[in-house]
Image: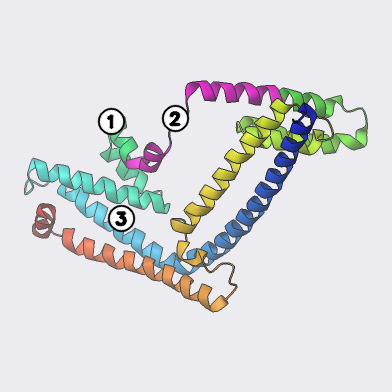
Amino acid sequence: MHTPTTTTQKRKQEFDKKLQQIEKEELKLKALEQELLRLQSRVSAESAPIVEEFCELRLETLKKLKSFLTDSFFKKKEIRQITHLMVELAVGLQRIGDSRAEAFLKELIPKKDTEVEEEYREPERRRYTPAPPAEKEAEGRLEIKSLFRQLAKAFHPDKEPLEHLKDEKTSLMKKITAAYENQDLYGLLKLEKEHLGGREFTEEKIELYIKQINDRLKEVKSFEGSLKKHGPLSTVYRFLYSRKSTIQEYNIRNEISKIEEELQREKELQNMVWDRTSLKIFLKG
């Protein structure tokens, strides 16, 4: 039969093992993100002229469509379709980062129509961000507040009598405050382990650590998986650690080719909506 001390020691060993695992995964993820950022930077630089041409074409199309909104050639239903199309095109332009799209959106989406605005502006957030259970959220906030107070009491620089340690504690206190402001329980627990780890933790505290580490590990794995399947330059992902520059160059060119294809589709769209008759046919289709 295991004594309470033996059980606690095993749980602490499990905690240390999981902490090492998550630190390894986070380092791997950080290296991946840095590599992706480097490759994205190259793609952005090389594709900048194509993106600029795309934005100008999109703006021309929006202006042309706007001129049709008061054209009696179109029926009310068709005017609504044109408006809907303009919103979609403006949102696409906005997501690229072109601030000129905002003027079209403000004009096309009434301020009172918040549901329409949410539908167009932030579909991913509405669709994929579940609301946390109220009890769990409240419990987490209490734990975060308690842990923040505990760490602040131990490491606040104003309570440090030795001048040469004040800078160190000031830096640490910034990390503690940032974790608290972000409601990052895992971050606070990690800081507690790193800087107060010499003391004995209770079985309850160890359980809390392990739960938070498991949750964080799932987040890291999930994010890595999303980068692999759906992230920017996902086609490059599988080659990142091969270090074969020829393969990376091929995939960079492939990404730029996709942008060029988008530009070609934009030109085709503009041709279809550029005059009244072709636009009417386009709306029927």
Residue 282, percent from left and from top: 13, 57
Magenta stretch, main secondary structure class: helix
How many discs mark residues in the rendered view? Answer: 3
Residue 237, percent from left and from top: 51, 63
Residue contact between numbered discs 1 and 3, judged by CB atoms under 8 Å: no
The verdict on residue 135 being magenta is yes
Residue 244, percent from left and from top: 57, 76
In this view, 222 is above or below 7: below
Q: Residue at x 56, y 67 (%)?
A: 240
Mark 2 to mark 1 CA distance (whole Å): 23 Å
Mark 2 to mark 3 CA distance (whole Å): 37 Å
Q: Of label 1 and label 3, which has the lower sequence position? A: 3
Q: Quadrant of residue 198?
A: top right
Residue 70 in sight in this render: no
Secondary structure category for the residue under label 1: loop
Q: Amino acid at mark 3?
A: Leu
Q: Of label 2 and label 1, which has the lower sequence position? A: 1
Residue contact between numbered discs 2 and 1, judged by CB atoms under 8 Å: no
Give the labeled residue for mark 2. 131
Secondary structure category for the residue under label 3: helix
Mark toward the viewer: 2 or 3: 2
Give the labeled residue for mark 1. 113
Secondary structure category for the residue under label 2: loop
Give the labeled residue for mark 3. 59
Q: Amino acid at mark 2?
A: Ala
| Pick the front one: 146 or 216 | 216
Q: Residue at x 78, y 28 (%)?
A: 3
The verdict on residue 90 being magenta is no
Q: Quadrant of residue 189?
A: top right
